[in-house]
Image (spheres, rainbow, N blue to C red):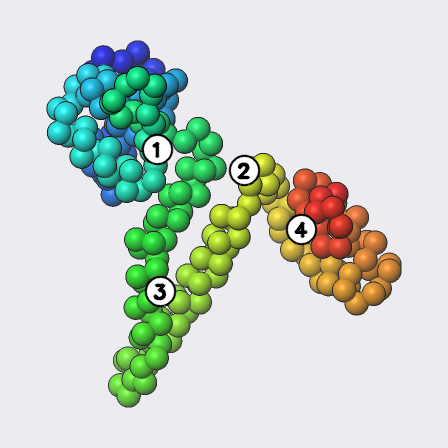
Amino acid sequence: MDLPPLTQRFVLHFGEMGSRWGINRTVGQIYALLYVSSKPLNADEVGEALGFSRSNVSMGLKELQSWNLVRLIHQPNDRREYFQAPEDVWAIFRTLAAERRKREIDPTLSMLRDALMEQPSVTADIHAQERMRQMHGFIELMTDWLNDVQKMDSATLTSLMQMGSKVQKLLEIKDRVKHVFTGNPQAETASVVAAAQLAPDLPVPGDDHGKL
């Protein structure tokens, strides 16, 4: 490898972790290099920096493109293709979540929905179906949450993560927030104030501007 020490350490670590995430070492190292690079790189530059063959680099870049983890860039007066990783870490998270859902979660939900439509007659299958029902409910709840996350901008996601344990306190006042829609002025005031104190950067029901 022809890389500065800190960059090389990061790239090597991603290569080692790649197999645990379901990708091979080459793909992990290519992504790590593109992520920390200050400029888009072409396949020759990637191969030279990592000591990989052109064919391995090409296959690795194609896999990263299939995951939407790198974008293709064309430079003026240059016929070569350049590649760059998204700079926004939340954009990377949203992409990984969407791709993993498409590849892993959606097929599982489809199988579970089919299984729940069955009418088992054997005791063991009746028990198994109930367990599947629980799994289906949990996965659907998580996918609904991920759908909401996908719609949030990066600033809102950062605020949400920084709330930490305040999320639990916010949930504790949800019943009072419901009073906003019942026309109870005192409950409305208390709910909005409490929500504002817990999450000043997040939208609160009844706020015309979407933010406090």
Q: Quadrant of residue 121?
A: bottom left
Please give the residue where the numbered disc 4 appears in the rendered image.
169
Q: Nearer the viewer, mark 1 or mark 2?
A: 1
Which quarter shows the C terminus?
Answer: top right
Do the CB atoms of the residues marked 1 and 4 lie less than 8 Å apart? no
Near mark 3 (Cα within 10 A), the count class, few <14, some 14-19 or many ≥20, is some
Measured as percent of width and height from the top left, residue 72 is found at 32, 31
Do the CB atoms of the residues marked 1 and 3 lie less than 8 Å apart? no
Please give the residue where the numbered disc 3 appears in the rendered image.
109
**The disc labelled 4 sits on which kind of residue?**
Lys
Mark 1 or 2, nearer chain start? 1
Please give the residue where the numbered disc 1 appears in the rendered image.
71
Please give the residue where the numbered disc 2 appears in the rendered image.
154
Measured as percent of width and height from the top left, residue 159 is found at 61, 39
Q: CA distance from mark 2 to mark 4?
A: 23 Å
Q: CA distance from mark 1 to mark 4?
A: 40 Å
Which quarter shows the N terminus?
Answer: top left
**The disc labelled 1 sits on which kind of residue?**
Arg
Q: Nearer the viewer, mark 4 or mark 3?
A: 3
Q: Quadrant of residue 160?
A: top right
The residue that appears at 39% across and 49% down in the rendered structure is 98
Mark 2 or 4, nearer chain start? 2
Q: Is residue 37 above or below residue 19?
A: above
Near mark 4 (Cα within 10 A), the count class, few <14, some 14-19 or many ≥20, is some
Q: CA distance from mark 4 to mark 3?
A: 32 Å
134 vs 145, nearest the viewer = 145
The residue that appears at 28% across and 18% down in the rendered structure is 78
Q: CA distance from mark 3 to mark 2?
A: 28 Å
35 vs 75, nearest the viewer = 75
Do the CB atoms of the residues marked 4 and 3 lie less than 8 Å apart? no
Mark 4 or 3, nearer chain start? 3
